[in-house]
Amino acid sequence: MKIEKNGLIAFLFTLLIGCSSTPVQSPPAASLLYVQTAGSGTFEPLDGSADRYRLVLNDVSPSVVYFSDRPYRIAGHVPTADFLKKLGFGGALDPNAAIDIAEGTPESDLIVAALTKPVYDAQRGTLTYEITVLDTPREGLAAFSQRMDKRLPPRFGAVALFVDNSPCPLGCGQTADCCPGFQCAGKAGAKTCR
């Protein structure tokens, strides 16, 4: 009986050592698409560059809609100010957007660009980005690749920005933060983004 107990203790100790050296896995992630709308806007060239502009949006919606594809089918909305704080501008990969102009001409109604330096004025309903026009959209915006234009209209009416974010963690804690529209909640060791 004593040998069996010692063998069981040795087995449990080995199992404990093996578990403690197991690397921490990243929480599962869902890829979200955000939709930002405005009543009108302008493109202003920056520094004489052929692909950098200031995008000024007027009558910006105070909230941004988000959704994911299968299998998660997540959907909701987040205040524009919170969206801009949490999206991750100035990181390794700035967010990309398909800028879809509702009543633009066929050669200048869809621009794909990287977004940087957002400036939001909630009282005036204006939002400004610096953008770099892209030749190729990220995977999350690949559906827009056939319609991409290079010609930017100086002024335009109603517009929707389809903003692609890097994958959003569904778990949270020390290794991950939640994406815009989500809060970290739950008990220690089992926190999720809700």
Image (cartoon, rainbow, N blue to C red):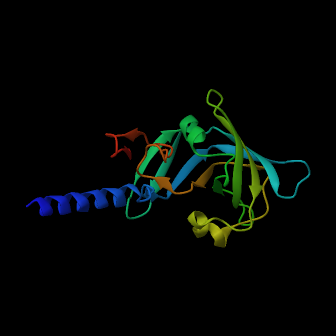
* Residue 103 falls left or right of residue 67: right
Residue 170 locus on image (x, y percent): 41, 52
Residue 20 visible to the viewer? yes
* Between 1 and 150, the one nearer to me in the picture: 1
Q: Residue furthest front?
A: 2
Please identify the residue farthest to the right as the structure is shown: 48
* Residue at 63% over, 65% down: 138
Q: Residue furthest bottom?
A: 146
Residue at image point 66% right, 45% down:
89
In the image, farthest residue toward the top? 123
Q: Quadrant of the N terminus?
A: bottom left
Rendered location of residue 24, percent (x, y): 43, 55
Percent across and percent down for residue 141 are 59, 64
Is 10 placed above or below 160 here?
Answer: below
Please tell me which residue lies in front, 71 or 174. Answer: 174
Q: Nearer the viewer, residue 85 or 150?
A: 85
Q: Is residue 23 above or below residue 56?
A: below
Q: Is residue 30 left or right of residue 124?
A: left
Q: Which residue is located at x 70 percent, y 55 percent?
A: 114
Number of numbered discs overlaid on the protein picture: 0
Quarter of the figure with residue 106 = bottom right
For residue 122, side relative to residue 153 (left or right): left
Q: Looking at the rendering, in which quadrant would you find the C terminus?
A: top left
Give the image location of residue 71, x and y in percent.
37, 64
Residue depicted at x 79% and y 62%: 151
Q: Nearer the viewer, residue 127 or 166?
A: 166
Which image quadrant for residue 70?
bottom left
Up-down: is 5 above or below 38? Answer: below
Residue 101 visible in the snapshot: no
